[in-house]
Image (cartoon, grey):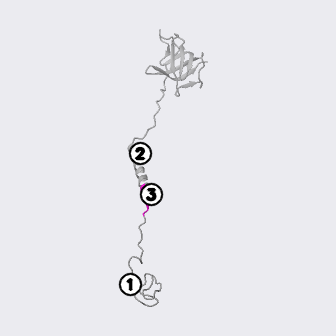
Amino acid sequence: MRCPACRNMIAPHHRFCSNCGARLSQQPAEAKPKKKLVSRPFLRQLGLAGAMLAGVLVICCLLLLILPRGEKRRPVPRPTNLGDSITQRQPRRGAAEIGSNAIYGKVLSLQRGAITLQSIPDGRQYVVYVGRRTRFDPPRYPAIGERIKVLYIDARGQLKATQVEIQS
């Protein structure tokens, strides 16, 4: 800014000229530039993203509290007295079982998950299903032609083996 009397350069905030001492009139808007409001879209977007993240976390926590938790499936206990009543007796006429829930026979074929055997006492054929819960004694699959004793449970008409004993 210049002094109107002596034309000397003066700082805009001074009231008097330092060279001639003349009183300076207040200059309008040219002397003091207004500050512009700087828009900050980045900060606004950052705040919006933070709010959305907080909302998602709250929803996840609520879902974890509300929804039922998956419980571990409990395995079905294997009967402890299965096959205790097996005796070497003559079977009833027309029955191939040698005891309650047990079959003694010769292996005819092996399929994936099933063993077909022929009962030794009367020659009837049975398909017994084996799975991961089936216990083998000795611990191996029987071969075709071997004699085995199968302890099973009847599950809706299917014979599911619980134990397969290979006879030597």
Tags 2 and 1 in contact by the CB under 8 Å rule? no
Mark 3, Cα crowd under 10 Å, few <14 / some 14-19 / many 20+, is few
Q: Secondary structure at mark 1?
A: loop
On the question of residue 83 being in view, the answer is no
Residue 147 image offset from top left, x and y in percent: 58, 16
Q: Which residue is mark 2?
A: 64
The answer to whether 16 is drawn above or below residue 131 in the figure is below
Residue assigned mark 1 = 25
Magenta: main secondary structure equals helix
Amino acid type for the residue under numbered disc 1? Ser
Check residue 30 for magenta coloring: no
> Given the image, on which type of amino acid does mark 3 rest?
Leu
Q: Quick one: 161 or 82, which is closer to the camera?
A: 161
Magenta stretch in the rendered image: 39-48
- Residue 80: x, y in percent? 49, 26
Q: Residues at badges 3 and 1 in contact (C-beta under 8 Å)?
A: no
Q: Nearer the viewer, residue 77 or 38?
A: 38
Residue denoted by label 3: 46
Is 40 a magenta residue?
yes
C-alpha separation, residue under disc 3 versus residue under disc 1: 47 Å
Q: Give SS at disc 2.
A: helix
